[in-house]
Amino acid sequence: MSSSLSKPSPAEKPATQASSGDAPPREETPVGLEEILQPLYDSLESGILLVGHDGLVTSCSLAMAILFGRSPDEVLGLTTADVNKLVLSLLDEPAQRLREEGLFPQSTGVRCEEFELLEPSRTVVRWVARKVQCPHYATVAVGTDITADVDLTSAYEKMALTDRLTGIANRRGIERAIHHELLRLRRFQTPVSFALFDIDRFKIINDTHGHGTGDEVLRLVAKAMAGSLRETDLVSRWGGEEFLVVLTETTHAGALVCAEKMRAKVATLGEIVGFNVTVSGGVYQPGPGESIPDILAHTDGRLYEAKNNGRNRVC
């Protein structure tokens, strides 16, 4: 008698073994937040610093560490007070607010600062530190190297305030000094004097020797005058062949001595160019209530007095 075997039901079907070529089951390894974010931090141009709720640095990007002249590992674990002390040690003259309040907001809000680090190399930093609501950290600080932007802005400002031919201040450049000194005069009665010079017979120099030689004379006169002044004084090319000098903390008598010294220095330039180069100058010490147009009018009047009295002199 023959018998038939019934097929097992799907529930009864034995499990098949994995072939030798199949990969073993993959175990999931938990990835920390730091492992995810650190490569991102290190790819940014700005430096990133994370501070935990305990006040300790929990993460420091490579760019931030480079600003401080340290490695990221040297910054990790520092307190905010340590970071403040580190940054202050790299500054020449820290601002009072930076010394008293530090780099990090004490409660809520944001702390924004700009400062210039002198070590390990000159770097101007824009710093923004912000309190955040996050279970992993309490404060995020971003430090950006803005040295190139600051230097470019300074270069443009210098160009705008400098005479391109002579390299000394132009009219706009000296106007700042005039306003500043007149403010000191009005507030503190600090004396200031002005001297206005004009190159004698400059048109004849141009017509006889050419404009290239005339430009060289302007450069030489500017250099001679600047070399005769103190660091606190300022000479400018006021226009054409005229030069205006601001003599700080100087009375009329002292200004006459300074102006005569400049006149005599310019008179020696004939030995360089092969023909006479002289200047005439007018000196004036204003009172506290005088306006800039009035001061310039008085100084100009003294200049023309020197011209009318024979040139190559100061009045």
Image (spheres, rainbow, N blue to C red):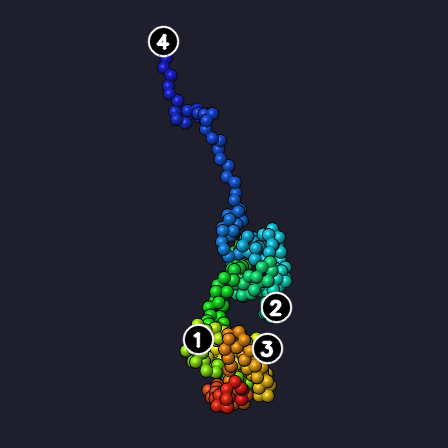
* Viewer can see residue 34: yes
Dot 1 or dot 3: first in sequence order is 1
Residue to which mark 2 is pinned: 93
Q: Quadrant of residue 114?
A: bottom right
The reply to whether discs 1 and 3 touch (Cβ–Cβ < 8 Å) is no
Q: What kind of element bears circle 2?
A: loop
- Residue 209's label in the rendered image is 1
How would you rate the neighbour count of disc 3 (Cα within 10 Å): few for under 14, some for 14-19, many for 20 or more?
few
Tell me if label 2 and label 4 are in contact, CB under 8 Å: no
* Picture coordinates of residue 183, whole percent (x, y): 53, 83
* Residue type indicated by callout 2: Glu
Of residues 241 and 140, the one drawn nearer to the viewer in this rendering: 241
For the point 51% across and 81% down, the residue is 278
* Residue receiving disc 4: 1
Q: Name the residue nearer the viewer: 311 or 191.
A: 311
Kindly check if marks 4 and 3 are in contact, taking CB atoms under 8 A apart as contact. no
| Residue position for label 3 | 230
In the rendered structure, which disc, 4 or 3, sits on the residue that comes first in sequence?
4
At label 4, counting other C-alpha atoms closer than 10 Å, the crowd grade (few under 14, some 14-19, many 20 or more) is: few
Foreground label between 2 and 4: 2
Query: Is 63 drawn above or below residue 211 in the view shown?
Result: above
